[in-house]
């Protein structure tokens, strides 16, 4: 019994040392600018910016090629201003529509599940050949569900501010005080 415990412990020790060595040997440094830019984005990975996710957009912003800082529609002007502060550039004009959520007209919904597959944050619930609905609290206003709907039963509607859903505006850690 003791031999089995010692042999398993020895194998675990050798494996742990090997993994520790590999982590040090093959460590890849990431540009801190990319992680700062990614933290300013909403992390919805919706692809509305034209990139496959928020990390890819942050890498493009930090890269050599010029990329517009106003491509993130879920992040809105707050994300754009944070990106501008990080990069040290002037903010650009963005269409500000306020907080919105997807709304599915359930009487028109055919239950095709195209919107469920397109939603990057799983804010749409429903089953095949049944009406779907949106969990408003989870919707990030990315509009990814609107395009794939074959019957155009999804629209983006403004969220009315009430005492139940009102929130403080989060401070921008990259904004300089004047």
Image (cartoon, rainbow, N blue to C red):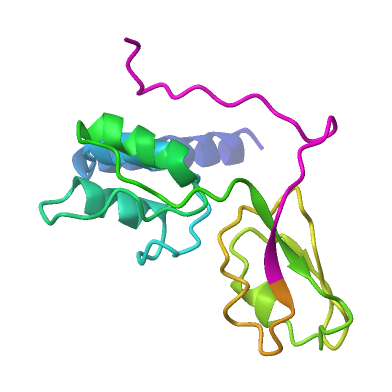
Q: Given the current orientation, which residue lies at the most extreme top position?
A: 178
Residue 138 lies left or right of residue 91; in this view the side is: right
Q: Position of residue 81 (x, y in %)?
A: 36, 35
Choose between 93 and 80: the one closer to the eye. Answer: 93
Residue 132 lies left or right of residue 43; in this view the side is: right
Location of residue 34 by image quarter:
top left
Choose between 9 and 42: the one closer to the eye. Answer: 42
**Above/below status of 147 relative to 97:** below
Q: Position of residue 150 (x, y in %)?
A: 66, 89
Q: Is residue 73 magenta?
A: no
Q: Position of residue 154 (x, y in %)?
A: 71, 74
Residue 21 visible here: no
Location of residue 51 by image quarter:
bottom left
Choose between 161 and 122: the one closer to the eye. Answer: 161
Q: Residue at x 36, y 51 (%)?
A: 55
Q: Is residue 163 magenta?
A: yes
Residue 112 lies left or right of residue 73; in this view the side is: right
Q: Position of residue 57 (x, y in %)?
A: 32, 54
Choose between 151 and 117: the one closer to the eye. Answer: 151
Classify the position of the C terminus by image quarter.
top left
Q: Which residues are magenta?
A: 155-178
Q: Residue at x 67, y 82 (%)?
A: 114
**Above/below status of 159 relative to 147:** above
């Amino acid at each position: 019994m003791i031999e089995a415990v010692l042999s398993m412990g020895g194998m675990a020790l050798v494996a742990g040392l090997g993994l520790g060595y590999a982590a040090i040997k093959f460590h890849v440094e990431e540009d801190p600018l990319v992680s700062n830019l990614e933290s300013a984005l909403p992390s919805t990975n919706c692809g509305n910016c034209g990139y496959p996710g928020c990390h890819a957009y942050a890498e493009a912003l930090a890269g050599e090629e010029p990329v517009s800082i106003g491509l993130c529609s879920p992040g809105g002007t707050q994300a754009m201003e944070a990106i501008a502060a990080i990069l040290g550039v002037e903010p650009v004009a963005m269409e500000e529509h306020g907080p919105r959520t997807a709304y599915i007209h359930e009487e028109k919904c055919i239950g095709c599940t195209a919107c469920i597959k397109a939603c990057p944050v799983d804010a749409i619930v429903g089953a095949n050949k049944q009406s779907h609905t949106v969990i408003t609290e989870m919707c990030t206003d990315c509009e990814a569900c609107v395009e794939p709907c074959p019957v155009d039963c999804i629209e983006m509607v403004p969220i009315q501010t009430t005492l139940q859903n009102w929130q403080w505006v989060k401070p921008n850690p990259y904004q300089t005080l004047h």
